[in-house]
């Protein structure tokens, strides 16, 4: 099984995300993560989908997505030619005796403490999925009360692959 990241540029219309995810559901394709947000031009939305499968399945996914009416452009974001980032919010049980250790770990990973309560901390971290996974592994000795991850967002490096729409 291979993993691929597809970046879609789509019309910013009601239901577009539902239609795209519905295609994956109907065809039995797996979505590992999906992020969507308005671009600099509010007429368009950029969607980043991480999916996995055999080569023929991944080719079929791209062909099927390209056929959708609202889809204006589909690109594969290759790791060497792209920048990826993910956001994670992590609520950790941290009383007064363990709080400083969790804060120190957060500082090493350039994460920020967004909330402090008597019994917990909320940590915000951005970076690669591998960086977030490594941080979570170091938190194994602490109780993670809640975890929210956005999935990756990505852009291709340079200007040669920028899509301009009228």
Image (spheres, rainbow, N blue to C red):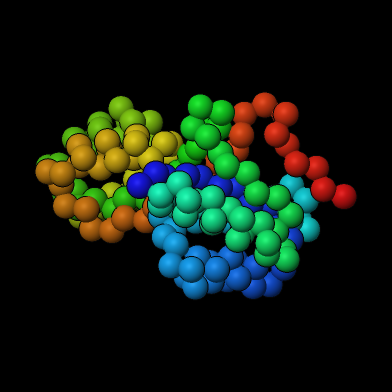
| Residue 139 in picture, x, y percent from top left | 20, 42
Task: Report the label total.
Answer: 0
Q: Is residue 90 left or right of residue 71?
A: left
| Residue 85 in picture, x, y percent from top left | 48, 39
Q: Is residue 129 visible?
A: yes
98 lies above or below 45: above
126 lies above or below 38: above
Furthest residue in direction front, as rendered? 56
Nearest the eye: 79 or 14: 79
Q: Is residue 47 left or right of residue 150?
A: right
The image quarter containing residue 12 is: bottom right
The image quarter containing residue 17 is: bottom right
Report the residue at 68% width, 72% height from top: 14
Report the residue at 37% width, 56% height from top: 148
Nearest the eye: 48 or 132: 48
Q: Is residue 107 left or right of residue 99?
A: right
| Residue 54 in picture, x, y percent from top left | 41, 49
Nearest the eye: 54 or 136: 54
| Residue 118 in picture, x, y percent from top left | 22, 54
Q: Is residue 12 visible?
A: no
Report the residue at 70% width, 59% height from top: 71
Report the residue at 60% width, 47% height from top: 7
């Amino acid at each position: 099984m291979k993993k691929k990241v597809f970046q879609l540029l789509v019309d910013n219309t009601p239901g577009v995300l539902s239609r795209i995810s519905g295609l994956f559901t109907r065809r039995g394709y797996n979505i590992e993560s999906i992020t969507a947000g308005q671009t600099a031009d509010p007429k368009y939305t950029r969607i980043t989908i991480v999916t996995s499968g055999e080569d023929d399945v991944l080719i079929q996914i791209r062909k099927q997505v390209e056929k959708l009416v609202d889809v204006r452009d589909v690109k594969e974001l290759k790791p060497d030619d792209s920048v990826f980032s993910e956001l994670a919010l992590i609520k950790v049980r941290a009383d007064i005796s363990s709080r400083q250790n969790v804060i120190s770990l957060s500082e090493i990973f350039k994460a920020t403490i967004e909330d402090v309560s008597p019994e917990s901390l909320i940590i915000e971290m951005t970076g690669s999925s591998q960086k977030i996974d490594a941080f979570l592994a170091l938190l194994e000795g602490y109780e993670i009360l809640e975890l929210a991850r956005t999935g990756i967002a990505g852009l291709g490096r340079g200007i040669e692959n920028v899509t301009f729409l009228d």
